Image (cartoon, rainbow, N blue to C red):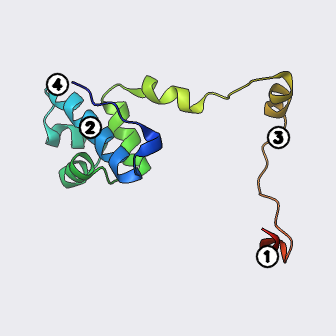
């Protein structure tokens, strides 16, 4: 049974561990050996082992694992722009900002 994970009440470590366990279970269901998956991903078996058992790894390794398991569609909603109004649509059309506006000195003291 798949465990429901409430992101509002979970730590980053808990979330990454549960996601890693789910991906490991999917790999096992597909009957892919850890060494074979690591080879497909282009990482060492120990890197994949660490990722699956601790949830710790680079974003690149996570994406490689998701792709090798054919689960890219699960990530797609993260990259869809959220448009709630015509004003939001107009903002999406503008060039992306490259920087955050710098706070004026002394502004921190007012917060």
Marks 3 and 1 sit apart, C-alpha to C-alpha, by: 33 Å
- Disc nearest the viewer among 2 and 3: 3
Crowdedness near tag 3: few (<14), some (14–19) or many (≥20) residues, C-alpha within 10 Å: few
SS label for mark 2: helix
Give the residue drawn at x 73%, y 25%: 83
Relative to the observer, which residue lies in front, 44 or 74? 74
The percent position of residue 72, horizontal first and vertical second, equals 43, 27
- Disc nearest the viewer among 3 and 4: 4
Q: Quadrant of residue 70?
A: top left
The percent position of residue 55, horizontal first and vertical second, equals 30, 49
Apparent side of residue 91 relative to residue 54 in the rendered image (left or right): right
Q: Which mark is residue 40?
A: 2
Depicted 18 relative to depicted 2: above or below = below
Q: Which mark is residue 77?
A: none
Q: Quadrant of the N terminus?
A: top left
SS label for mark 1: helix
- Disc nearest the viewer among 2 and 1: 1
SS label for mark 3: loop
Name the residue tied to disc 4.
Answer: 29
Q: Which mark is residue 109?
A: 1
């Amino acid at each position: 049974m798949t465990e429901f994970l409430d992101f509002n009440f979970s730590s980053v470590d808990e979330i990454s561990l549960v996601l890693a366990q789910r991906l490991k279970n999917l790999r096992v269901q597909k009957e892919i050996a850890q060494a074979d998956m690591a080879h497909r991903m282009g990482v060492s078996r120990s890197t994949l082992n660490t990722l699956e058992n601790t949830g710790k790894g680079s974003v690149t390794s996570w994406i490689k694992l998701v792709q090798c398991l054919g689960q890219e569609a699960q990530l797609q909603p993260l990259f869809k722009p959220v448009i709630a109004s015509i004003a939001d649509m107009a903002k999406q059309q503008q060039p992306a900002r490259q920087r955050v506006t710098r706070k004026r000195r002394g502004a921190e003291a007012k917060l």
